[in-house]
Structure formats: structure tokens, C-alpha cells
Image: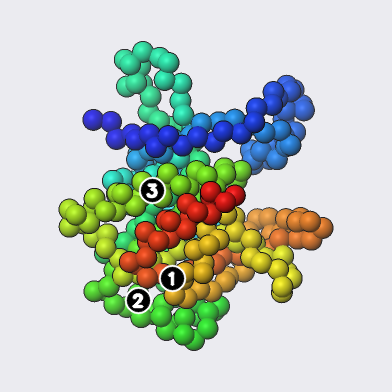
Amino acid sequence: MSNKKNKEIHDSESEEEQDSGSEKDSDFDSDGNFVGDKELQADFEGRNPEDCDFHGIKQLLRQLFLKSNVELGGLAQIIISQNYVGSVVKQCLDYGQDEDDDDDDDGSDGVFGITTIINITKRKDEQCIQQIRSLLTTLADDNADDRTKALVKKILANDSEHVGFVINERILNIPAAISVPLFSSLQSELDKAVKKNMPYTFHYLIWICKTYNTGEESSEVLFANQEEKPIADEALASFDVDVTEQAELSQWDYEGGALTPCRKVLIFDGSKFNNLVRLIKEEVEAI
């Protein structure tokens, strides 16, 4: 049985025909990210993570963790191993070929996003999870207030109350609308896993969001993944981390100013996951 699942994710933007030659090439930066003014149209689908997605998942994880001491290959393997929970985003292929050709499709085209959740209590003995737990403690010690530091240490020390680590990453320019079917699917998959007595009942959730700071005290925090903005208000605790020194491009121009890359670490009551999914849907509908 194929482990692919199509969540009917569509990024439908207005079509404009692209020019050829050097003008077309100028629409992309050295990393292959689209930076031009033309709008593209593409269809995406959510699938279960597969072995062929390893390098794509690892690259997306690097966006989140940057130069932190986390073994990303091991984390990618965990995501693939629990492919009954979570999805990767891939571009829809041309299925107008004979069904016999499906066996030749290894799905190795690019991974554009990953949305999943990992039990970092149950898997605490695995090296990459140990590194994530250590990183969370260090980041809290260096950036959080005393109450939040104590909470981080408490929830990581108590093995009877499982902690879920949420990962929601995608490449630049993929719109927030893509998150709705991904989180709806994740919500359904978690419910099914719990009914099978699998370890996906969480007392706490930890979520690291990519954010940007304009350097103005009165300015609001900008979220790289816009759908994550409303969930910040639901957190039991949170703290911000400046990652300027780790980012290859530390600042981006923004309305005459500059954006400094940060991370916002959010801690939630694990029973509130369904509410977080609802807030994400409402935010996307309002965009």
C-alpha cells in the first residue's frame, strides 16, 4: 500500500507568464528562493514522510535550528519513522501517466514543508532529542524570566508528563494557507494514535517560532509563519531568543528599517492543541 496521502493543498495565485533568459534568472537569489515580482502558480500536497524525504526534511530543520548543536539527521529519521503522524509538503506531480509508471516515482522531488510533533519525553534517550532538551534548558537559562526557567526545568524533568515538540517549517514564499490542511491532518492523526494507546497524549507542548524584530520597542513581533501569530497569546509561558549571530543573513530590509531574526519559544498546555489548530484556521481565513 502506498503511504502517500493527498491533502489537496493548493497554492492558487494569479498567473503571469515568465520571461526567459537572464530576466527569468534574476527572479531567484543565489539560494534558489524566488525574489521577483511575478506571481507563480503551483499545487502542493501533503504526504506521509518517506525515506527519500530525508535530505529535504533535514534542510528545513536547519532553518529552525540554524547552528545549534542538534543532530538534524537523527531528527529527520525520527520524523520519517513516525510517518503515521505528521506530513511533508511536496509539489503535485503530473499524474497523467500510466499507473504502471507509479512504481518509478520515488517521490524524491523537493520537500517544501514539514508539520509534525515529536514526543521528547518518550524519546529522551535518543541523541538528537537529548540535544533539543539541553538546548531548551540553555535557551531558557539565558533568555527567560525566573518563572519560565523553572517551568522549563520542571516539565523536562518529569517523565510522567509527556512533552510534545511541534515542528512547523516550510520554505520562503509558501503562503500560510497551506498550514490549515496540515494541522487538520495532524490533529486527526494524533486522535487516531491516542485511540491506539500510542504515546501522543501530551501534558505540555513546546513550539519554537521563527520571528523578526524591527528593533523598535513599540513594534509588534513579525512571525515568519503568519498563522503562528495568534497562538502566542495562548502560551503558558514564552521567551525570545536573538539568533543574529547564527543566521547567515542577520538582517533584512523592512519598510526602511531592518529585521533581526529571532526565535520565540512557546510553552502550552498539551490539552489545548485543538484550540491552537482552531486559532490557526481563523488566522488564515482572516489573511
- The mark found on residue 184 in the picture is 3
Q: Residue furthest right?
A: 256
Give the percent coordinates (x, y) of residue 213: 67, 65
Q: Secondary structure at mark 2?
A: helix
Residue located 31% across and 49% down the image: 188
Q: Secondary structure at mark 1?
A: strand
Is residue 169 at least partly visible in the picture? yes
Amino acid type, residue under disc 3 in the picture? Ser
Name the residue that disc number 2 marks: 155
Q: Residue furthest bottom?
A: 146
Q: Residues within 10 Å of mark 3 (few under 14, many from 20)?
A: some
Give the percent coordinates (x, y) of residue 108: 43, 32
Q: Quadrant of residue 245?
A: bottom right
Give the percent coordinates (x, y) of residue 131: 41, 66
Mark 2 or 1, nearer chain start: 2
- The mark found on residue 267 in the picture is 1
Q: Residues within 10 Å of mark 2 (few under 14, many from 20)?
A: some
Residue located 43% across and 60% down the image: 276
Q: Residue furthest left?
A: 196
- The mark found on residue 25 in the picture is none
